[in-house]
Amino acid sequence: MKLQGACLIVATLVLVYSNVDALLRPSSIRLENNSYTGIVVAIHSNVNESVELIDRIKYMFYEGSKYLYEATRKRAYFDKVTIIVPKTWTHKSEYKLPGNLTFDYADVIVAPPNPRWAPLQYTKQYQGCGQRGVHIHFMDEFLTDPEVELYYGPLGRVLVHEWGHLRWGLFDEYPDAVGDPDNYQEFYFSPLTQQFEGVRCSYDHNAFPLKFFPESQMYRPCNGGPDIGYEEGCVYYVVANQDKDLVSSSIMFSSYPLGPIKYFCDNDSSDSPNLHNREAPNKHNRLCTSRSNWEVLRDHEDFRNNINPPREISEDDLMPEITIVQHQDIRVVLLLDTSGSMTSKNRFNKMISSSANYISSIVTEGSYIGIVEFNYVGIIRKNLTLVTSDDDRQALLESLPPDAGGSTAIGDGLLKSIEVLSEGGMDPAGGIILLITDGKENVRPNVADIMDTIISSGVIVDTLAFSQNADGLLPGLSQATGGKTYFYSDEVGSNTLYEAFAATMERGDVLDSERRVQLMGTSWSLKSDEERTSSIFLDSTLGRNTEFVFSWETENVLAIDVNITRPNGSMIDWSYEGYGVDISFRILTVSIKGQAEAGSWKFKVWNNGTQSQDVVVTIYSYPASNDVEPIIVTSELSGSTTAFEQNEPLVAYAEIRQGFRPMIYANVWATIERPQAGYEPIKLQLLDNGAGADVTKNDGVYSRYFTEMTGVGYYGVTIDVDNNEGNAIVIDSNPFSKSRPIVDPDDAFNLPDIGGVKIPSPGEPPAEPTGTPAPAFSRGTSGGSSRVDATPPGFSPGADLFPPGDILDLRVTNTSFLDKTVSLAWTASGDDLDSGAASWYEVIRAESVLAWQSDPDPESHLILNSSHVLQGNLSAPQVFGSREDLQVMVPVPEEVNVTSYAFVLRAFDDAGRWSEFSNVVQAVLREYVPESLPAPAPATTNAPPATSNPQPATGDASPVMTDAPPTTRDAPPVTTDAPPPTTDAPIVVTVTPPSTWLQWWHIALMVVGGSVGLSLLIGLILCAVLKGIPSKATPVSPIIVAEAGEHTNRAYAHEWLE
Ligand SMILES: [Ca+2]
Ligand SMILES: [Ca+2]
């Protein structure tokens, strides 16, 4: 859609952004009067045009709204949703203008799969418990494939589960080998029930302990039982039908076809079906210190202090209003500060050089560019100009302001820019204003006075703070309009200049294959006659339109000389046809003709002038072709401002991906420029280790806290990435799924593909993600900036203000009943969050997870000292990121064969500050550990029970389960030949031990199923599968079948006892 056509459309969607909580990326989602508005769904430009897809997204929100309303107990529903479709899709009259919405900041994206999670949807979460996520990512086939709902439940429910992650910072409550690899557990020992329990929430889900054998595609019951635990590799196989009287939560455990699951769990013990399982070692409990979903929600801004209380809303009113908009052409106004201060330190020259490079090289064909300057007032220098030729670019270059002088009328400059974007009756919404300034506004109107005008116009204001003197209002202006914030210091090494410009071209639906990729951005100070060399590694994913750009300071001379050595050793100098010099804008550009070859490109810069020069170096390239996915680095900061006065740290996140495939094991560094003279930039390695600031291990998102503030001002971040000497890997596939389809075991062999990705069978054993080695590459990009407006009282740089970081990955690695030992492991935190080393650990032993939680005072439990420690040292913490191992002695009573203890710890630093308590773990010591039995022999004579048409799990009855749960509070045990039990049946169990454990399984199924006929059928099927297992494999003794009592509701009906 071209600009002219757009003039006719008046109605515009303008969403107002807020920085309600952390993350630099803005969000327009709001909850007011129980209604969620400002939800943005964006479809990636690689997704094929599809009316069906749009319909499915609508359906998902319609259904999701009703479900959300019920799930929040009438506190929230989806009200206003906007879907952005790509520019390449056929325009339709109902498609509106996108206003200030962009793909980058959408809340839900529909895009090619991320193999880390595919074919499933997932929510990208950079931050911890209670904090919002980045976005929900669906692959389009997941939404349109009709079979998805059979296995994963209604899309509306899937959406609400993801909403829990995205909006409220909840985490998964199911055992998750992919998203939580180090802490993944299927079962845990509960001191409450004195049994091994499946990881689940709420307590009363029923499931089978089954072991899956991928080679033979078979399941069999696990060796072991609830009192001694199960063999290695046993999974907690949840089935479709659950009893609604026993189970009504939790959506974060499974949103899927489990009919009765309709709530987020809570901590109200009078509401048992909805009661949170605090003991279960899952990711939610680990990161949210065992708080239930609603305990987190009640602290969230959406519901804090009982705002948005329950309200009756009719089903019609719960239907969200869905608007479809389409990306449009890019419109940018350069808003350049030409006040007097810009003449100092050559800022004006640098601004004009980079503007000239932008117009010449970065602006893409078909974009509209205007130019406004401001000093005493705002001055329009060039109205919006469609760029389609070199002549257009030349006309823009000639309109750049020639000099600087005067005061700083930022407000009037903004008004003039909106005027440019409104020319000819155009709607300015969605136009980008790139504001570059080094000063503080001193001419009315002030920005604050016209803020409403700016916001209601729908323009996006990106700001580039040019030096620490720039006005502190810039981050707020960007945040409020959905813009980005950049900081460029006068210091050597700083270079976000080019990227602030380049970002304006990446807002629409830019294909990754058309994305400018920056390889290096820095600046050097060269004395007269000094020369300096460096190199970049150009990888094979790039090479088109490769440019080396150098700018210098001294006017009217060519003050530098550059030569470049190609990977093959041949030299490029001034005689090369792509070697261009523009004296008036002080830019030297070397454009590599054709495809630049992969390899190491060396370059040398010589200052041939008589004065020192700051030389800005920028090297970028474009993806080699449409067929090659480039390696992309994106980054976020925890906010455009950092509340350092409240001891808030700055957090840097960088995501490395090739297409949508995450890159793990990369070498990622952040360099943070700091205010106040004399403080060097700090270099921090960002880590993808699932500890400290990093929420998920090996997801290609690298994170780190920064705590070494030097005072008030801008903190500019640059990110440098390479392939870690060949160790980096681009993930191709994950051979197992994070969230399981809910299917019956006899259907689990024949799961379909979704978009060409097979749904893994539940229980497929976890493995390391597989991938291909990343090619040698280098990237150097801006990470944006964050401003500190105030410091804590009495602050001086270097003061120790931060405690060690919280340890949230404590785990039990081993126990020995015989030796009476427990081995623990965790990732060391630092002296200051995740930097340096703490001074000592306090490790506490409690009777149980619940005992600790009911009295989290170390003095009430046992604080370990060196006499308890066999291996490890409580007073010698290692540096952040190191794995800590600790082996401790525990008492084992004479008369028991199972005993357990809970452990929790915290770290102290040398300034007397300490972390919060870690997650709490339960260690269990067993006299007998069920051995891992061999796989069942392949059923050669009897085909596996898979049917060619898998049964949907949503059906009223499933082959395995009937309406009766395996065990209930009131359900009595049954005899093998008894009729199906009723709730009033007498509690009598008399069984003769069968001769083989297969028969026990059959019995168990009858108990579980409560229906003899069905059980027989299933028993027969399973017998066919299990045929060939030696009957002596599991010694059998008289079984206990669900003894009546307060704990039996949580027991499994079938047990094999040693
Ligand atoms: Ca990570
Ligand atoms: Ca400290």
Image (cartoon, grey):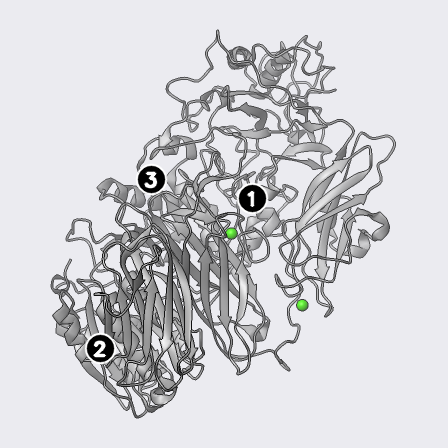
The residues bearing labels 2 and 3 have C-alpha atoms spaced at a distance of 43 Å
- Give coordinates of residue 295: x percent, y percent: 58, 53
Between discs 3 and 1, the one toward the N terminus = 3
* Few, some or many residues within 10 Å of mark 1 (<14, 14–19, 20+): many
Q: Nearer the viewer, residue 282 or 857?
A: 282
- Tell which tag, 3 or 1, sits nearer the viewer: 1
Residue 242 visible at all: yes
The residues bearing labels 3 and 1 have C-alpha atoms spaced at a distance of 25 Å
- Give coordinates of residue 812: x percent, y percent: 69, 42
Q: As drawn, is 160 to the left or to the right of 90?
A: right
- Tell which tag, 2 or 3, sits nearer the viewer: 2
- Tell which tag, 1 or 2, sits nearer the viewer: 2
Mark 2 lies on a secondary structure that is strand
Q: Residue at x 79, y 40 (%)?
A: 821
Between discs 2 and 3, the one toward the N terminus = 3
Q: As drawn, is 171 to the left or to the right of 877?
A: left
Discs 1, 2 touching: Cβ within 8 Å = no
- Give coordinates of residue 238: x percent, y percent: 53, 30
The C terminus lies in quadrant: top right
Amino acid of disc 3? Leu
Q: Which residue is mark 1?
A: 180
218 versus 603 height, above or below: above
Q: Which residue is mark 3?
A: 143
Amino acid of disc 2? Ile
Q: Residue at x 14, y 71 (%)?
A: 392
Q: Nearer the viewer, residue 436 or 390?
A: 390
The residues bearing labels 1 and 2 have C-alpha atoms spaced at a distance of 50 Å
* Few, some or many residues within 10 Å of mark 2 (<14, 14–19, 20+): many
69 versus 213 height, above or below: below
Q: Which residue is mark 2?
A: 371
- Give coordinates of residue 772: x percent, y percent: 43, 41
Q: Nearer the viewer, residue 721 or 942?
A: 721
